[in-house]
Amino acid sequence: MDNGNLEGISPKLAVIMIGTNNSGTNTPEQIAEGTTVIVGQLRKKTPKTKILVLGVFPRGETPADAKRQVNEKTNAIVSELADGEHVFYLDIGKSFLQDDGTLTREIMPDLLHLNEQSYTIWAESIEPQVAKLMAD
């Protein structure tokens, strides 16, 4: 974003889903700080753009997974970026999980990366919010 990639454009909506790659080495506070910086850059460089920040997706098989816990704590912090006017937050993580909170390999084969089924879940889960924000 600092190298001109946003010059001359003014998208109506930016959807951000970042942070899971940091969950093995960074704290939730550090990950949230990075997200906050990116949201700030988007606000500065494209002030008319609405920003939909997605919660970091779950990873690991169970709720006890350390990286999943980092992501959940990150989400709690990042959710506070939402102002309801320019920045919006949506956590669709539960859409990937079983009722007992487990993540299956049918949804994410390595319990991290998405497959065709989970990309469909992602798209269908955010579509109503994207449609609403694009209509405003």
Image: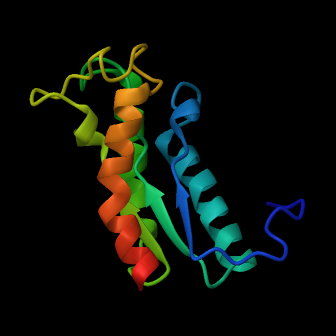
So how many labels did they put on this image?
0
For the rendered model, the colour scheme is rainbow
Tell me if residue 91 can be seen.
no
Q: Residue at x 44, y 27 (%)?
A: 114
Q: Position of residue 71 (x, y in %)?
A: 41, 38
Q: Is residue 72 above or below residue 23?
A: below
User: Relative to residue 56, is residue 96 drawn left or right?
Assistant: left
**Among the 4 quarters of the image, the one containing residue 99:** top left
Horizontal arrangement in the rendering, residue 55 relative to residue 39 (left or right):
left
Nearest the viewer among 61 and 27 is: 61
Q: Position of residue 34 (x, y in %)?
A: 63, 52
In percent of width and height, residue 35 lies at 58, 55
Residue 14 lies left or right of residue 89; in this view the side is right
On the rendered image, what quadrant is the N terminus found in? bottom right
Q: Is residue 28 visible?
A: yes
Residue that protrudes farthest toward the right in the picture: 3
**For the point 57% across and 31% down, which residue is it?**
21
| Residue nearer the viewer, 9 or 104 | 9
Q: Is residue 51 above or below residue 64?
A: below
Snapshot quadrant of residue 9? bottom right
Residue at figure coordinates x 51%, y 48% from the top left = 17
Q: Position of residue 129 (x, y in %)?
A: 34, 66
Vertical comparison of 8 with 30: above or below: below
**Residue occupying the far left of the picture:** 99
In the picture, the quarter occupied by the C terminus is bottom left
